[in-house]
Image (spheres, rainbow, N blue to C red):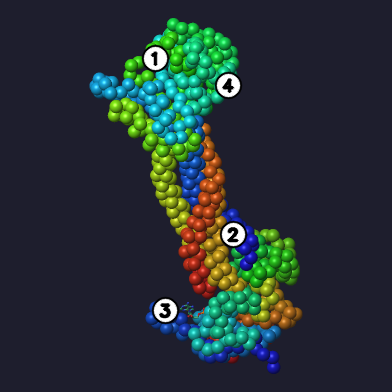
Amino acid sequence: MSAPLALVRSFTQLRTNPLRTLLTLLGMVFGVGSVVAMMSIGEGAQREILQNIEAMGAANLHIQARPVPDAELGDTVNDSVGLARADLQTLQELVPGVQEIAYRKKLPLNVTSLNLPTPRLAPFAVSHNLTRVHGLPIAHGRPLLQSDFTFQRRVVLLGHDLARDAFKDPAAALGQRLRIEYAWFEVVGVLAPRTALGGDLPIDPRIYNDALLIPFDTAAAELHPPPAYGELDLLSLRVPTTQDTLPAKRAATPVLRALHGGVEDFEAVAPEEILQQRQATQALLNLVLIAIAAISLLVGGIGVMNIMLANIMERIHEIGLRRAVGARRSDIRNQFLLEATLLCVIGGLLGILLGNAASFTVAAIIDLPIAFAWESMLIAFAISATVGVIFGLVPALRAARINPIQALQGE
Amino acid sequence: MTQPLIQLQGVTRVYHAGNLAVPVLHGIDLAIHPGEYAVLMGRSGSGKSTLMNILGLLDRPTQGTYHLLGQDITALDDDAISALRGRTIGFVFQSFHLLNHLTIEQNVGLPMEYQGASARARHARATELLERVGLTHRLGHRPNQLSGGERQRVAIARALSNNPSVLLADEPTGNLDTAAQQRILDLFAQLHTQDRLTLVMVTHDPAIGAAASRLIRITDGRITS
Ligand SMILES: Nc1ncnc2c1ncn2[C@@H]1O[C@H](COP(=O)(O)OP(=O)(O)O)[C@@H](O)[C@H]1O
Ligand SMILES: [Mg+2]
């Protein structure tokens, strides 16, 4: 019998008992569906990590101030002044590949003229290159200039959400004057919005949506003189590529430790490293998912095998008749194998639909990032066909072995 | 004298039930020539079906030789026997054995599927044969929409689809009423006289035996006339 005809006949056979076919499929539908859903979610998580790291500047080594417990502070300050601009020159000279260094310090804030609650605001004293190094495009106005620092100009850049909420329209914020503590500042620029990216990285770009970025020198002169300990919170060392962040970390750590009199009051975070950790976590998760998927597919496959075995008994006359009209054992074997495989493949295709529907629904409800994983469709298809062949083989071989005379007489 | 279509020599068939040997056929010598209409009669349990299964290549003799169209079938493997069976034997069973998930036309064309016939060829042949048995109007129906007599005529059309050398019918009218039975027997008679088809039929009914060109009696696994 030709292959296309055999396929058509298998379809006809499966159509004769749609309810049973559907019930048999269910195992496969859920097995494959869970594989696809999990892969979409996994792929989504993976992309989010990449985007996140991209957003915070994949080619930056971040050095954060590590809070020192109050009890140790007394000892610490004898040896170290914390992260400070004094560190910059040495880092620039001793860490290979550093192109530039940006820095910032979170400012205490008591009063502003803005009609917004102060705890929401994120005021930072920043270096002039911070927006460039942290990849923050200016939507309106201009960035901070070197001259703003030289002349300690009272200028400020606003985050997108803050500008929008305080002045109705972000663009309308330009040229406005606002009071921060007891000094008046002019808004010279507004940042582009940063989209939501769940992140626990040292730089979650979303914090800049409510930021007030003030030239470091101006803040020191007009607002709060830098504290004796901890002049800076964060240094970001720009290196050529993401891969350079790990070597930069290895080089920077001993340099800073020496500068800080042996005190580890800082923490260097390389995106490359986070990426690797996340990928390791993801790999572990994937392993668990594979195990779950394997179990579902096993259950689905056994369901198919069971139905095919029952099928043989019900269709024993058909087997005998087919043998009588010239079917070889291999024709019978192929027929049953094809039916089982078709059953699994249909289940697999439905599973692909279900898996995608489920993951997109879940994603829409709980705001989970997911991605359409094309490979997962192919993999799911191949897996279901394989399950069909594996679990269809035993019933098919059994059907092929049946003696035609007994089959024709069979009950 | 033409070469016999079927030639059995010293054929025995012994069934094994546990470690008990049950001999059913004892040294059958039988030759059937092309164009013969042979009727096989005998009491229930005498071995008629066993013999028919051997003739139809569904079973093999325990001992003895079987030549079909001059070919020694004991030398053939299972695949070759299946192929030969599909090409040369047409079966008509007492219980019809039609497939309910296929249409009448597809049932008739089924044996041709295993010979690699095209859809067009199967359709043409099925149409021709269903016309022959008077069921053209039933082409697209399912077997369970047909009466017993109609079903058996479909089964006969199916048995003829590959142009077999011999038609084997084991009690083909056993499940039918008298009218339907007569129609089947008329069809067989027509196939014998018009088409010169070779037929072997098992029956209990002595009246049916009269229409045949040859009567073979079997008693306790031996041919007695
Ligand atoms: N598979 C088998 N195993 C054991 N005995 C069998 C088997 N098939 C048939 N027989 C026995 O062989 C004898 C002949 O059977 P069968 O050829 O069907 O007779 P008939 O068709 O003439 O009524 C019977 O006694 C039956 O019980
Ligand atoms: Mg019998």
Q: Are marks 2 and 3 in contact (CB under 8 Å)?
A: no
Name which residue type carries label 3: Ala
Name which residue type carries label 2: Ser
Residue found at the far top of this picture: A182
Say which residue appears at 75% left-offset and 80% top-offset: B194
Look at discs 2 and 3 and give the one toward the viewer. 2
Say which residue appears at 38% left-offset and 22% top-offset: A86
Say which residue appears at 56% left-offset and 90% top-offset: B9
Image quadrant of residue A175?
Answer: top right
Please determine if labels 1 and 3 lie on a single subunit.
no
Look at discs 2 and 4 and give the one toward the viewer. 4
Spatial separation of the CA atoms under disc 3 and disc 4:
93 Å
Q: Earlier in the sequence, mark 4 or mark 1?
A: 1
> Is residue A212 visible from the viewing direction of this image?
no
Please determine if labels 2 and 4 lie on a single subunit.
yes
Q: Earlier in the sequence, mark 1 or mark 2?
A: 2
User: Which secondary structure lies at badge 2?
Assistant: helix
Q: Would you name the residue on which mark 1 appears?
A: A108
Please determine if labels 4 and 1 lie on a single subunit.
yes
Name which residue type carries label 1: Pro
Given residues B53 and A1, the one toward you in this image is A1
Q: Chain of mark 2?
A: A
Given residues A137 and B167, the one toward you in this image is A137
Please determine if labels 2 and 3 lie on a single subunit.
no
Name which residue type carries label 4: Ala
Q: Are marks 1 and 2 in contact (CB under 8 Å)?
A: no
Identify the mark at residue A139; answer none if there is no mark. 4
Residue A381 image point, x, y percent: 54, 52
Residue A298 lies left or right of residue B200; in this view the side is left
Identify the mark at residue B17; answer none if there is no mark. 3
Residue A95 lies left or right of residue B216; in this view the side is left
User: Which quarter of the rendered picture does the N terminus of chain A lie within?
Assistant: bottom right
